[in-house]
């Protein structure tokens, strides 16, 4: 239908915040930009005009004579145009992951030709689009986590130099918590690794294999699923099959939002090649941006088999094995049942090739299926999804620019002692000016990171503060909090709220204005040692987000105050659960899971970021537990970057905790990630024996846990000294594996010790052994069959996420090149 719409161009020439409150509070937010009346679409979405936003604080002028014709949905009849950097502050109803959809439809008029608009878009500091232009309508979909510390998402548009920015519509859709994976499988195969928490994803492809295009009307989250035909490498190798969508079963633990039944009710299977020995792969090829990691989700539902265990096939991604002799029905234990699995893939060559085919040797008829597929791009370690230059993550603000210059100057001159004083003075002056500007300007936007202001007035720290700041990543997750806010949150640092006291200072429990419970660490401002550690901690934690690392929510940077605000860990330190308190004893399984969690956190530190990070103070008081006993590694005050490629170690003054120190590091003062592995070995022994690393009250040979435990481990009698609570509930095999792992960690020389990745693998194996032991005991079966190695096929998880709508989107068009390389998650380490 040809329809003529009036397009209103609203121009905002002043840089302002547009505040929009979600109505209803629950949840989804649909904004029809530039409109002044609400718009109800047939698919149920109800778009509010941004001009009627309750707290809007801007003015605009509709320009007349901008009549144009468009076939597109009414949504694109209006557009909002920005000539200056502008933000939407989107208040969401709940925290957690959200779909963020941005609709761009480049209308043109006598006033503007939006096809020539070039601009950048960021969400909460993540660069979604950089110097972006489009010549046809595009819908971009992202998955953004909102609410670590606030329930506001800041969506900022910033025109490239001399250009304009525009947006037609914005959708923010709250996703069920469980919709998103917490772990994914690497390709080539390896143990499951944690999916990147805190990263932003961009939907690249969403495919309904063997089925029709599904649009926003067919999907409860208004996603669009495309047909797979054009991605098939050899279309004749596949044959589409379908069943009744009502016959599809969602097992418990799998959300119906994973994908509509319509996706699972159609599939591609292997076409009948009319050959006796039917062996070939069905392949799909997708173009992506090279150098990024991708989350590839495959959806399966076996409605083609006549019985269980009749469909066994291989899956390859980029020519590497992803699933081997995969027996789909063994995962679901019934037919027509939904199953999906996530993989992490580094698309080195800008392609994702997905292949399915029969295994080499098989007793079942050769066949393989695929029902649906989604590919998401994962933001790199700098928080960019679309980065082509250094500046990409920073929308240029005057204040920031001048600050950068100052820092550069300071860093250059820093070494010249004679000039030291002058530099410091100049720095201080400029900094003050900058700070004034920054606070007057747009405070939210600058929530990114200025740790440099800590105690800048202190003469001993000026220059180092400057060079420190220049190394701070341009994108930081945590926010700057006002001291008054923190005082309020902790009832003026009420003594009754003290959670603990450490070398750095006291830790309080607090509740932020928005109800988020936090742990507030307040340093002693007079301690120089503390200052360095404070900065290290901000620098390190700001760059890191991981399920098994304690998140930094914010920090306070007012003079003479050093305050760090973390997520609150209800379970407290691991040590408390082992001994010295009246908490119930942890079971062996719980202990293994806690060690696995902590190992994952350390593994991520060692291999998950561009620069290796060494924790340097791994111990049971630095492993915290949340209310579900999920372990998170804390306290990065001593951590530092590991050796670069051409170094084998970092020389440093020995720091760490007595009893946990790597003897090699102690002797040679050379720090490697293997020092953390040693300390982790001590933790493993402590967890097993439920006693402190050093206990001077014991007989001499028992004082040091390492000596004592190794004495028994070497004799193969470690069970003699384990926590009495564990006796009788621990599988001998599991204990053996665990003991061996700890022994290897405690190797005299770093080179003999395993990597954290290996440790993790071994602990997971020990857990597996324990679980099968428990099962056997429960079944009272005396069979002594020990399960095989974990086969790396994920169980149906209580996670998933999905959805997207890609109206008129030219998918390959969305690919923009990027060179930044994210090493997010190589499980093998490097
Ligand atoms: C609008 O619709 C007409 C006829 O249906 C088609 O020829 C034309 O290409 C469409 N224009 C756009 C911009 O989609
Ligand atoms: C932005 O993109 C345009 C072309 O789309 C290009 O001419 C221009 O140089 C780019 N600007 C920057 C800063 O990358
Ligand atoms: C299924 O295959 C048939 C014949 O090969 C084709 O006509 C039809 O369009 C296909 N359906 C889909 C949804 O791809
Ligand atoms: C998708 O929804 C529309 C509108 O309800 C419907 O006409 C169409 O048949 C649906 N598509 C499928 C494949 O069921
Ligand atoms: C997979 O292997 C084929 C043949 O060896 C090669 O042409 C292709 O580039 C490879 N694809 C990827 C994504 O590695
Ligand atoms: C299927 O693809 C994989 C990976 O590209 C390859 O190793 C295998 O040989 C292929 N199988 C057949 C039967 O062609």
Image (cartoon, rainbow, N blue to C red):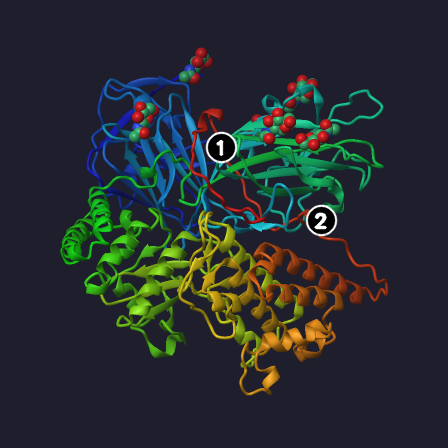
Residue located 46% across and 29% down the image: 815
Give the answer, above or below, for where 324 lies relative to 768: above
Q: Mark 1 — residue?
A: 290
Give the answer, above or below, for where 33 lies relative to 620: above
Q: Quadrant of residue 539?
A: bottom left
Q: Is residue 357 left or right of residue 504?
A: right
Give the answer, above or below, for where 584 lies relative to 602: below
Q: Quadrant of the N terminus?
A: top left
Sequence-wise first label, 2 or 1: 1
Picture coordinates of residue 73, whole percent (x, y): 42, 25
Residue located 48% across and 53% down the image: 648
Q: Is residue 756 left or right of residue 457?
A: right
Q: What mark, if any, has residue 578 been given in the picture?
A: none
Q: Secondary structure at mark 2?
A: loop
Picture coordinates of residue 705, whole percent (x, y): 59, 77
Dot 2 beta carbon under 8 Å from ligand 6:
no
Q: Is residue 348 left or right of residue 40?
A: right
Q: Is 518 in front, or is 682?
A: 682
Dot 1 beta carbon under 8 Å from ligand 5:
no
Residue 6 in sight here = no
Give the answer, above or below, for where 301 lies relative to 755: above
Distance from disc 2 to disc 1, alpha carbons, whole Å, reads: 29 Å
Q: Is 331 in front, or is 722?
A: 722
Q: Quadrant of residue 337?
A: top right
Q: Mark 2 — residue?
A: 791
Picture coordinates of residue 665, whole percent (x, y): 49, 65
Q: Disc 2 vs disc 1: Cβ atoms closer than 8 Å?
A: no
Q: Is residue 11 left or right of residue 536?
A: left
Picture coordinates of residue 382, whole percent (x, y): 40, 44
Q: Quadrant of residue 557?
A: bottom left
**Whereabouts is ligand 5, in terms of quadrant?**
top right
Q: Secondary structure at mark 1?
A: loop
């Amino acid at each position: 239908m040809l329809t003529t719409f009036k397009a209103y161009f609203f121009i905002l020439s002043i840089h302002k915040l547009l505040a929009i409150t979600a109505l209803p509070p629950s949840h989804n937010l649909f904004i029809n930009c530039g409109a002044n009346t609400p718009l109800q679409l047939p698919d149920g979405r109800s778009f509010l005009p941004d001009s009627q936003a309750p707290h809007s604080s801007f003015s605009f002028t509709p320009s007349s004579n901008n009549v144009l014709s468009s076939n597109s949905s009414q949504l694109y009849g209006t557009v909002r145009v920005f000539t200056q950097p502008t933000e939407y502050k989107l208040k969401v109803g709940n925290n957690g992951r959200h779909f963020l959809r941005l609709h761009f439809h480049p209308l043109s008029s006598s006033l503007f030709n939006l096809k020539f608009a070039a601009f950048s878009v960021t969400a909460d500091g993540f660069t979604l689009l950089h110097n972006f232009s489009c010549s046809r309508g595009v819908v971009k979909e992202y998955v953004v986590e909102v609410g670590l510390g606030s329930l506001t998402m800041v969506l900022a548009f910033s025109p490239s130099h001399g250009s304009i920015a525009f947006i037609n519509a914005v959708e923010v859709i709250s996703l069920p918590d469980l919709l998103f994976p917490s772990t994914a499988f690497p390709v080539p195969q390896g143990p499951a690794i944690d999916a990147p928490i805190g990263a932003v994803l961009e939907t690249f492809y969403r495919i309904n294999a063997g089925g029709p295009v599904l649009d926003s009307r067919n999907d409860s989250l208004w996603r669009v699923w495309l047909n797979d035909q054009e991605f098939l490498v050899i279309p004749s190798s596949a044959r589409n099959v379908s069943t009744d969508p009502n016959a599809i079963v969602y097992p418990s633990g799998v959300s119906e939002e994973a994908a509509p039944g319509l996706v699972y009710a159609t599939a591609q299977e292997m076409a009948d090649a009319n050959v006796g020995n039917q062996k070939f792969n069905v392949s799909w090829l997708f173009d992506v941006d090279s150098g990024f990691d991708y989350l590839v989700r495959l959806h399966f539902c076996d409605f083609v088999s006549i019985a269980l265990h009749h469909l066994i096939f291989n899956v390859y991604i980029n020519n590497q094995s992803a699933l081997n002799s995969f027996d789909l029905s063994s995962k679901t234990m019934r037919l027509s049942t939904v199953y999906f699995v996530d993989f992490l893939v580094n698309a080195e060559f800008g392609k994702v090739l997905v292949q399915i085919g029969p295994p080499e040797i098989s007793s079942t008829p050769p066949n393989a299926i695929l029902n649906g597929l989604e590919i998401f791009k994962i933001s790199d370690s700098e928080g960019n999804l679309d980065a082509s230059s250094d500046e990409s993550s920073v929308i240029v603000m005057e204040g920031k620019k001048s600050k950068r210059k100052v820092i550069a100057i300071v860093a250059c001159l820093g070494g010249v002692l004679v000039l030291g004083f002058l530099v410091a003075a100049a720095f201080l002056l400029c900094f003050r000016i900058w700070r004034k500007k920054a606070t007057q300007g747009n405070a939210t936007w600058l929530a990114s990171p200025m740790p440099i202001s800590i105690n800048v007035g202190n003469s001993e720290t000026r220059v180092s503060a400057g060079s420190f700041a220049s190394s701070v990543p341009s994108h930081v997750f945590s926010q700057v909090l006002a001291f008054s806010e923190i005082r309020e949150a902790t009832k003026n640092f009420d003594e009754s709220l003290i959670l603990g006291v450490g070398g750095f200072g006291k830790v309080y429990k607090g509740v932020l204005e928005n109800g988020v419970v936090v742990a507030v660490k307040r340093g002693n401002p007079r301690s120089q040692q503390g200052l360095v550690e404070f900065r290290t901690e901000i620098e390190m934690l700001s760059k890191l987000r991981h399920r098994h690392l304690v998140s930094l929510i914010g920090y306070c940077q007012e003079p003479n105050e050093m305050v760090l605000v973390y997520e609150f860990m209800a379970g407290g330190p691991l040590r408390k659960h082992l001994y010295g308190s009246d908490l119930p004893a942890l079971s062996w399984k719980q202990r293994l899971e806690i060690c696995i969690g902590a190992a994952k956190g350390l593994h991520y530190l060692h291999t998950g970021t561009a620069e290796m990070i060494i924790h340097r103070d791994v111990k049971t008081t630095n492993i915290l537990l949340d209310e579900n006993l999920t372990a998170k590694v804390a306290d990065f005050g001593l951590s530092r970057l590991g050796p670069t490629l051409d170094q084998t170690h970092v020389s440093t003054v020995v720091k760490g905790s007595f009893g946990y120190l790597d003897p090699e590091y102690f002797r040679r003062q050379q720090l490697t990630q293997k020092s953390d592995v040693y300390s982790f070995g001590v933790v493993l022994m402590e967890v097993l024996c439920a006693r402190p690393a050093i206990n001077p009250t014991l007989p001499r040979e028992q004082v040091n846990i390492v000596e004592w435990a190794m004495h028994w481990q070497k004799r193969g009698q470690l069970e003699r000294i384990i926590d009495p609570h564990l006796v009788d509930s621990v599988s001998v095999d599991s204990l053996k594996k665990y003991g061996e792992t700890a022994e290897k960690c405690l190797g005299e020389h770093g080179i003999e010790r395993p990597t954290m990745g290996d440790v993790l693998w071994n602990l997971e194996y020990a857990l597996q052994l324990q679980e099968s032991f428990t099962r056997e005991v429960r079944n009272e079966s005396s069979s002594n069959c020990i399960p095989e190695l974990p086969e790396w096929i994920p169980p149906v998880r209580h996670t998933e996420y999905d959805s997207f709508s890609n109206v008129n989107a030219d998918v390959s068009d969305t690919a923009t090149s990027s060179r930044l390389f994210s090493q997010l998650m190589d499980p093998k380490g490097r």
